[in-house]
Image (cartoon, rainbow, N blue to C red):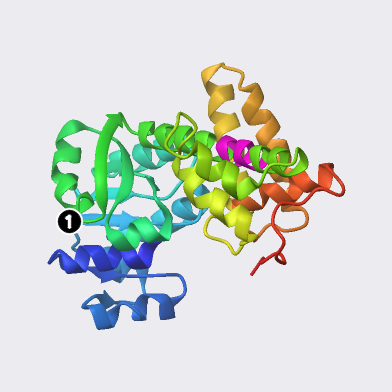
Amino acid sequence: MGDPMARRLLAAGHAVTVWNRTHAKAEALAGAGARAVPDVQEAVRGAQVIISMLEAGPTVQQVLAAALPALAPNTLWIDMSSTQQAEAQAVHARLTARGCRFIDAPVSGGVGGAAAGTLAIMAGGGAEDFAEAEPLLSAMGRATLVGPAGAGQVAKLCNQLIVGATINIVAEAMLLAQAAGADPAAMRAAIRGGFAESKILEVHGQRMLDRNFVAGGKISTQLKDQRNILAAAEAAGVVLPLTELVTARYLTLSKTIPQADHAAALIGLEQLNPGQRVGTGPDQLG
């Protein structure tokens, strides 16, 4: 995700210094005009704005700890990783104590959306900081301020809640059509444009028909998000029974095909229904 996002910033005319824990990934952006450096402190030193895109909250904390000594006062750190709300709030507190500023701005749209500059960006932070960040964020997609620090992560979790559950519902619809004698592909075409229409039905419905489970979004990543949703629900004092069920389904799949696309929820459903299978081709798992 970070690679195409950096390329969008470069294409918009911004000066970008890039660092990655695997330096070769940063060097790959040099041809697009980025300055690739091997040391995180060198990357952030003198920067007015820092954007991080990392795998999870603990990694964000590790990178922040390494970078912190080199941060200038009033630096704006925009974390676009998907983390827990409490993790984002902890980063905010740590940066504020250092005299710096923070926005959590997780995204939805996948690698394709990052490359096209059409990401949905959910931001949490102060209004003035968001106004400063918005021209940068607009190079990567459509940004919306949804509340104070940590609120961006809540909005992203709401997005992932809908995505994770809907993938499972589309899988159930596909399997029911197959088992009850209807053509799943024709069923999908028939309901397109009606109330059941969604990006999930469009993209992942086709993936299921094609048995294409080469990862865009991984089951392991979806499981991380599901657990973060439940943690946020517990902190907010609410019960989410459907999310608990969806989490259990992804947990089962994570034990056998964690690197498959989350559309492979269909495989888990088929395992509960021996003898039923959508599509005729072999499973593509990558």
Disc 1 element: loop
Q: Which residue is mark 1?
A: 48
**Left or right: 178, with 227 as reference point:** right
Residue at 38% across, 33% down: 150
- Up-down relation of residue 26 to residue 45 (above or below): below
Residue at 46% across, 28% down: 195
- Up-down relation of residue 168 to residue 45 (above or below): above
Main secondary structure type of the part rendered in magenta: helix
Which one is nearer the viewer's eye here, 144 or 180?
Answer: 180
- Up-down relation of residue 93 to residue 19 (above or below): above
For the question of whether residue 267 can be seen, the reply is: yes
Q: Position of residue 206 (x, y in %)?
A: 55, 54
Q: Position of residue 134 (x, y in %)?
A: 18, 45
Figure quadrant of the N terminus: bottom left
**Left or right: 172, with 71 as reference point:** right
**Left or right: 14, with 166 as reference point:** left
Q: Quadrant of residue 10?
A: bottom left
Total count of labels: 1
Q: Position of residue 186 (x, y in %)?
A: 58, 46
- Which region of the structure is painted magenta? 165-171
Residue at 35% across, 39% down: 92
Name the amino acid type tagged 1.
Gln
Q: Quadrant of residue 126?
A: top left
Q: Position of residue 88 (x, y in %)?
A: 41, 39
Q: Look at the image and say whether residue 168 sits in the magenta stretch.
A: yes
Which one is nearer the viewer's eye here, 34 or 11?
Answer: 11
